[in-house]
Image (cartoon, rainbow, N blue to C red):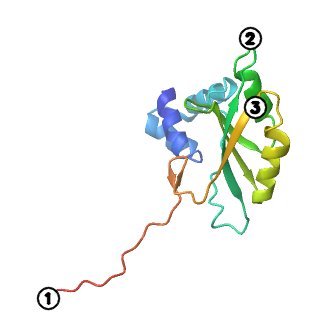
Amino acid sequence: MREKILTYIEHNSKIDLSDLAMMLGCDQATVMNELEAMENEHVICGYPTLINWEKASVEKVSALIEVRVTPQRGMGFDKVAERIYNYPEVDAVYLISGSYDFMVSIEGHTLREVADFVSAKLSPLDSVLSTQTNFVLKKYKDHGIIMAEKHVDEREKVSL
């Protein structure tokens, strides 16, 4: 049942509890208890809202920063990751394969704000060897949701 609940709420966290119970074939109390248990176990970590900032009147700059680090003895990458993810500007930190160790996702109001974060906070960390900042120019799909508007072909049909 847990997997089914997680699958449903992953795609729509606002689903009505009674609808979810009906789809699962059980009562609302059972579903509510299972949701609370998964929240307490940190299986469910939150219910964020996905916003298309391009359509809002707020300017946002998103960046994906590749970070190469020296892991700390006895703690590996975890301690370095913790120092990075504790910055309020950081949205996500992933340990990745390839030529870099971490992918750090941040948002700022301007390019300068992002650049200042990288140069003043991220790069000076003892374990950081190098960074590469990639600015997001446009989001087409985010968290499984298509953000781009579908192109409508407005050409008229012509037959000869």
Give the Cα separation between the discs numbered 3 and 1: 66 Å
Q: Secondary structure at mark 2?
A: loop
Return the disc, 3 or 2, that comes first in the chain's sequence.
Answer: 2
Can you tell which quarter of the image residue 95 is in?
Answer: top right
The three-letter amino acid code for the residue at tag 3 is: Val
The three-letter amino acid code for the residue at tag 2 is: Gly
Say whether residue 127 is left or right of residue 96: right
Kindly give the residue lying farthest to the right in the view shown. Answer: 120
Position of residue 138 relative to residue 6, above or below, is below
Return the disc, 3 or 1, that comes first in the chain's sequence.
Answer: 3
Residue sitting at 82 percent across and 28 percent down? Answer: 126
Q: Secondary structure at mark 1?
A: loop
* Viewport quadrant of the C terminus: bottom left
Kindly give the residue lying farthest to the left in the view shown. Answer: 160
The three-letter amino acid code for the residue at tag 1 is: Leu
Q: Which mark is drawn over residue 160?
A: 1
Q: How many marks?
A: 3
Return the disc, 2 or 1, that comes first in the chain's sequence.
Answer: 2
**Residue 86: x, y in percent?**
80, 34
Determine contact: label 2, label 1, CB under 8 Å. no
Position of residue 2 relative to residue 66, above or below, is above
Crowding at label 2, few (<14), some or many (≥20) Cα neighbours within 10 Å?
few
Q: Which residue is mark 3?
A: 128
Q: Secondary structure at mark 3?
A: strand
**Residue 27: x, y in percent?**
52, 33
Q: Which mark is drawn over residue 74?
A: 2
Give the Cα separation between the discs numbered 2 and 1: 76 Å
Position of residue 160 relative to residue 149, above or below, is below
Residue sitting at 56 percent across and 57 percent down? Answer: 139
**Residue 124: x, y in percent?**
83, 36
Say whether residue 65 is left or right of residue 80: left
